[in-house]
Image: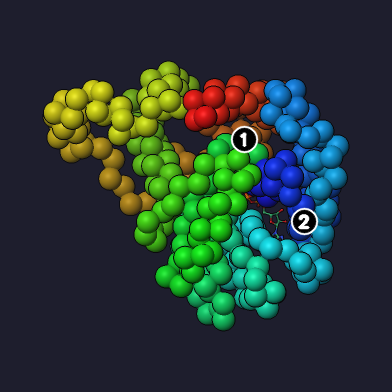
């Protein structure tokens, strides 16, 4: 995720420091960023040359955190989704320049959980980007109980400046808005497969060619208005009773993870990716998303 976020800031003309604990990961990220920049330029979505955008990103090893963050005005933490690791990192960041805003790209923890025990929790804020972060417009901005109003407002304005669509999350809640929706869809999808109702291919096709097809231009609440709320209510009343209400993830996904079938990165998940390179698959996906981004920006003008 970090590379896409770094790219979003650099493409908007800002200087970026990309820090990781592993030099090899930093080098691979730079290579992938080169490919992302090439595509952005091809689609006419860069206001600068790829070389100039790339030159604004400097890489740092996180073993020297002081050097990596000195003089930064805004930090986006993007390390694995393990609360203890995030807390440890934020306790180190607690000592950096008081004017620096510390944000987390956490996809499930609340800001209060992450900043607990810090001396300066008032400058911690959540910025939840979506993969691939250099393309998908939304950033959920969420706050903890101690986060300052000015920190939230500066963050929201910064997201607008880098071309994102910030949406403020009104209350602390795990998963915020979108990951709750995604979790609800995933729970039902796995349940339908468990019950033998649908295959992964058919589920994805059904989703993409129906509500997914409409979602990019019409949110689900606006769609409900078009359908007629009385009709929607009747449907909900009937269907809700039979929806999956499991409180633990389905064996369909748990068994795959146990077998090492982790998706694209391991060559197999719900689908089999062997035979095509990750780069080829990513490029194909990004080309489609970039076409959508152009339409989205036209509509949002
Ligand atoms: N993958 C997604 O689709 C996605 C989407 C939205 C949000 N997120 C969130 O973004 C964060 C990162 O997810 P990811 O999928 O990019 O994880 P990842 O494991 O791919 O990348 C994490 C990176 O952090 C580095 N790292 C670990 N500890 C570090 C430390 N102390 N200092 C510096 N670098 C360190 C690792 O070397 C690794 O390169 C998580 O909080 C995740 O929930 C991920």
Closer to us: 299 or 31? 299
Which mark sits nearer the N-terminus, 2 or 1?
A: 2
As measured in the structure, the alpha-carbon distance from the residue carrying label 2 to the one carrying label 1 is 20 Å
Q: Which mark is residue 190?
A: none
Q: Residue at x 45, y 27 (%)?
A: 216
Residue 284 seen in render: yes
Closer to us: 139 or 236? 139
- Whether the residue carrying mark 1 lies under 8 Å from ligand 1 is answered with no
Percent x, y of residue 44:
71, 24
Question: In the image as oriented, which residue stretches furthest toward the front?
Answer: 301
Residue 7 seen in render: no
Quick check: 132 above or below 150?
above
Q: Which mark is residue 135?
A: 1
Q: Residue at x 82, y 33 (%)?
A: 49
Q: Which residue is mark 2?
A: 17
Report which quarter residue 40 is drawn in: top right
Q: Residue at x 42, y 41 (%)?
A: 182
Closer to us: 39 or 194? 39
Percent x, y of residue 197:
33, 25
Provide the secondary structure element on which disc 1 rests. Answer: loop
Indicate left or right for 140 with 236 as reference.
Answer: right
Quick check: 286 above or below 167?
above
Closer to us: 40 or 249? 40
Q: Residue at x 55, y 38 (%)?
A: 137
Indicate left or right for 93 with 104 as reference.
Answer: right
Indicate left or right for 299 with 75 as reference.
Answer: left
Contact, mark 2 vs mark 1 (Cβ under 8 Å): no
Quick check: 268 above or below 14?
above
Percent x, y of residue 83:
54, 66
Provide the secondary structure element on which disc 2 rests. Answer: strand
Quick check: 296 above or below 132?
above
């Amino acid at each position: 995720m970090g590379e896409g976020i770094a790219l979003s800031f650099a493409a908007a003309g800002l200087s970026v420091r990309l820090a990781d604990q592993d030099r090899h990961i930093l080098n691979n990220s730079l290579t992938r960023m080169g490919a992302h920049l090439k595509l952005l330029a091809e689609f006419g979505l860069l206001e600068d040359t790829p070389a100039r955008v790339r030159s604004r990103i400097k890489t740092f090893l996180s073993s020297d955190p002081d050097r990596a963050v000195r003089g930064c005005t805004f930090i986006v933490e993007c390390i694995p989704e393990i609360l203890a690791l995030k807390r440890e990192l934020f306790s180190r960041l607690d000592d950096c320049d008081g004017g620096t805003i510390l944000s987390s790209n956490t996809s499930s923890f609340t800001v209060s959980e992450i900043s607990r025990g810090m001396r300066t929790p008032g400058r911690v804020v959540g910025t939840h980007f979506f993969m691939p972060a250099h393309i998908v417009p939304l950033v959920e901005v969420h706050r903890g109980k101690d986060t300052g109003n000015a920190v939230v407002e500066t963050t929201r304005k910064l997201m607008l400046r880098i071309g994102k669509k910030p949406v403020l999350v009104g209350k602390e809640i795990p998963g915020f808005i979108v990951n709750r929706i995604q979790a609800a869809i995933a729970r039902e999808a796995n349940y339908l497969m468990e019950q033998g109702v649908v295959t992964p291919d058919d589920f994805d096709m059904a989703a993409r060619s129906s509500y997914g097809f409409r979602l990019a231009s019409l949110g689900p609440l606006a769609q409900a208005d078009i359908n007629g709320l009385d009709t929607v209510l009747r449907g909900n009343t009937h269907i809700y009773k039979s929806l999956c209400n499991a409180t633990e993830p389905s064996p369909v996904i748990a068994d795959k993870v146990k077998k090492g079938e982790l998706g694209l990165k391991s060559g197999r998940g719900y689908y089999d990716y062997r035979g095509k390179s990750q780069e080829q698959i990513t490029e194909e996906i990004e080309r489609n998303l970039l076409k959508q981004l152009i339409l989205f920006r036209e509509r949002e003008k």
